[in-house]
Amino acid sequence: MHRILVRKQTGNFKEKIRLASSKSESNRALIINALSGFGGELQNLSSARDTQTMIRLLKSEDAVADVLDAGTTMRFLTAYFAITNQIKTMTGTPRMCERPIGILVDALKSIGCEIDYLSKEGYPPTQLKGFTKQKTNEISIRGDVSSQYISALLMISPSLPNGLMIRLLGEIGSIPYITMTIKQMEAFGVKVSADWDAKKLSVEPQTYKPTSYQIESDWSGASYWYSIVALAENDDVEIELLGLKENSLQGDSVIVNIMAELGVKSTFTSDGVLLQKIKANDTFEWDFTDCPDLAQTVAVVLVAKKIKGIFTGLESLKIKETDRVLALQNELAKIGGTLEEVEAKTRYEVNFGGSWAETPTFETYDDHRMAMAFAPLAMISDVIIEEPGVVAKSYPSYWEDLSKIVSFDELN
């Protein structure tokens, strides 16, 4: 087991951080560019392991596509390989093979792709056996499970002989991620008709046009720096995060509004956004349906700052890299916090009041966001992070960037 001790930060700091590029934007751009014949120029692609895995597998002619632990890569490539008539076995880590894919597979099969399960029904590994004829140009899919299924289907839609109309059933989660997909498709010359009231997304048969596309820095990664400023004991601290846009495609840019309530002021500059400490509110309530990847960061900040919180929209967290609700419940207890489900699968309360363990040790559950959400507690106390290397999934330079503010000791 590898562990690091993150030493408590003392004093003031004013830093500029060049954030990692957006994994979400990068992975969509890679699929769309592949569908355009690999003719575009993609600039500032993410160094995240998920994105590097996508790049490797798009180039590979191997019969087996092992996505490791990359959920987005699994879902996007399943749709891409299926619709481009490639014979592939899709697999990943043991945890990846526990993450459902049945909704996407059912949709692809109804369109005309041949896909078999090689183990458990509804889960990887799968065997893609090609696509010869489109059976239908209308499908229905649940909108409340994973927006990645919807994005995967949207991106391949213009390449279908008859296009595709997608009906979204029930509540629609993570709409900003679907909108991101649509905007990137439009950047490559494809028009999508989105009727959110009728819950219909329609794409006519079209051809992607190769283009030059610049990837923005990652707002999900930015959230951990907001946390650092929010938790800093000294008011005279500043961090400028470079490469972020005020009018972002990324849903997690809502961290600007969230952290305005929790003690961080955002000022957009010509290079990015400047973070400064302000007074926080006493209570907090947020629906994370459209930004589930921010929930861990915010829960940690609430407990550490002793702010009572109400969370909704956490349904998708249980099928991420780990069961993030359970992981948060376990780890928040080490700093005297609780995350209690007060309405089944709907409403959670974040509270504080228990004891803070001396030099708490946080498990990361093979989940990059657990490591990055709990490390900012070094603004308050020494902390130990187990398996810190998990950050490679989305933000490989996280510890290097964090070393500008805190110091580390390798424990083993």
Image (spheres, rainbow, N blue to C red):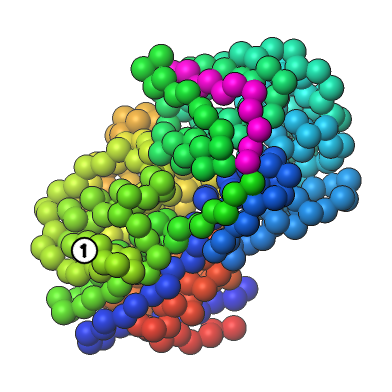
In this rendering, position of residue 368 left or right of residue 256: right
Q: Is residue 381 left or right of residue 63?
A: left
Horizontal relation, residue 63 to residue 368: left or right: right
- Measured as percent of width and height from the top left, residue 169 is found at 48, 17
Looking at the image, which residue is at 39% across and 84% down?
A: 404
Q: Residue at x 88, y 46 (%)?
A: 63
Of residue 376 and residue 254, the one placed in the foreground of this image is 254
Looking at the image, which residue is at 30% across and 54% down?
246
Residue 349 x %, y %: 27, 42
For the C terminus, the image quarter is bottom right
Mainly helix, strand or loop, the magenta region? loop
Residue 8 appears at what percent x and percent y?
A: 32, 82
Of the 4 image quadrants, the one containing the N terminus is bottom right
Please report the bounds of the magenta region as a residue range.
199-209
Task: Give the residue pinned by disc 1.
Answer: 267
- The local secondary structure at tag 1 comes to strand
